[in-house]
Image (cartoon, rainbow, N blue to C red):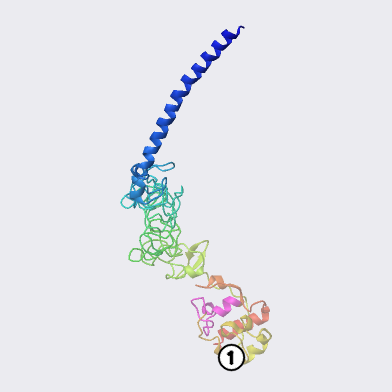
Amino acid sequence: MRPSAFALLLCLLAAACGADDEPATADAASSTGGLAATTDADPTAADSAADSDVTTTGAAPGACGDGRLDEYESCDLGPDNADDGACTTACRHAVCGDGLVRAGVEECDDGNPYDTDACLRSCAAARCGDGFRGPGEACDDGNVVDDDGCPNSCSAGGCGDGFVQVGEACDDANAVDTDACLTSCALASCGDGVVHAGVEQCDDGNDVDDDLCTNACVPASCSDGARNGFESDIDCGGVYCDGCALGSACAGNIDCGDGVCKQDVCTPPPPLMAPECAPAAVTAAQLYPQISPSCGCHANGAGGLTFTDAASLRANTVGVAAQMAALPLVSPGEIGASYLVFKILNQQSDAIGGGGLPMPIGKQLSAEHRCAVINWVKSGAD
């Protein structure tokens, strides 16, 4: 390149550089001039205008209570941030389950999701009938029906709770069995084994009509026109009624009044079948030595029939009524009317009212001694 041309190029470059520097300098001056102007004014004015809410509340920027909705806040009421029922003091909208009770809105708020404690997850206080089994409740079916498995008291349902439930005929909530409702919650009835005051006279709990208590729960009697009370026939026989007339049904001689029981019918008593004995006059003094080895007619002297001498033999038999039969033990001169003779001959069942075992108990008199007793009675039992 020629020197003159090179010089011209340098001049053009210098001119271009000078043109670019001037606007930059002007901009810098303008910028500097702006900063200087601001610096000359009140340095806090702009900040005061921008942060006036901070100055008003006294809260640090971004804190709950600064009146501004900041991150993690769903509401902010400002200086006091009082809980107004919608925004909590934690700057969160009030909801059931936050652990804070809203007056007039929530009955409770325990902050948990359980329905079995004192506060439901709906923030309602637990109560009988809410459908949840809460503290102190045996059940809670959430209805107002008292006669199902859970009464409205939420107590344990069942017999005795005062409510008639499925399977119960009654429930009077008491432990008295003699009223109209048993403790089993069954209605009182004749035959349940409990005598109900003012209604029944007896109740033996069975369906047997011929025992001491009839199926009408009335005691059997000897004049009720029915065969009951262990009677052998209608209103007669048995332990409690008089003996039956001849021809009546019987189970033993005790059931017959004027006869003996033969083949379950009261019949006239048969005559005594006495052995053939040679007639002889016999006294008690003569008889006692012959029967003394037996010591009496009853074992161990039962019934007073232990004889220690001739006098006791006579005193304990002559004119003395038999315990069962309708005859005296000894009727002087009458062997057919002396139960002692029936007993030693083992014919006691042929005597009116007689029965049991022959005498002496466990022993047997010889034919000679039996005739001695018979002759003693025939001789007048002296």
Q: Amino acid at mark 1?
A: Ser
Q: Residues within 10 Å of mark 1 (few under 14, many from 20)?
A: some
The x, y position of residue 36, in whole percent, is 39, 38
Q: Quadrant of residue 341?
A: bottom right
Foreground: 211 or 298? Answer: 211
Q: Residue furthest front?
A: 4
Query: Is residue 258 shown above or below 171?
Result: below
> Between 49 and 278, which is closer to the camera in this rendering?
49
In front here: 72 or 54?
Answer: 54
Q: Is residue 340 magenta?
A: yes
* Residue 217 lies in quadrant: bottom left
Q: Position of residue 184 (x, y in %)?
A: 43, 58
Residue sitting at 45 percent across and 25 percent down?
A: 24
Quadrant where the N terminus lies?
A: top right
Range of the magenta residues?
323-343
Decide whether residue 203 is among the magenta residues: no
Residue 53 seen anywhere in this rendered image of the structure: yes
- Vertical position of residue 215 compared to residue 270: above or below: above
**Residue 144 in view in this figure:** no
- From the viewer's perspective, is residue 378 above or below residue 28? below
Give x and y (percent) for residue 162: 37, 57
Indicate whether 308 appears above or below 153: below
Which residue occupies 53% across, 86% down? Answer: 318
Circle 1 SS class: helix
Of 187 and 160, nearer the camera is: 160
Kindly give the residue lying farthest to the left in the view shown. Answer: 104
Farthest-out residue, top: 2
Residue 141 screen position, x and y as percent? 41, 48
**Which residue position holds label 1?**
312
- Which residue is painted at 64% across and 89% down in the image? 288
Overall secondary structure of the magenta stretch? loop
Left or right: 201 in relation to 25 = left
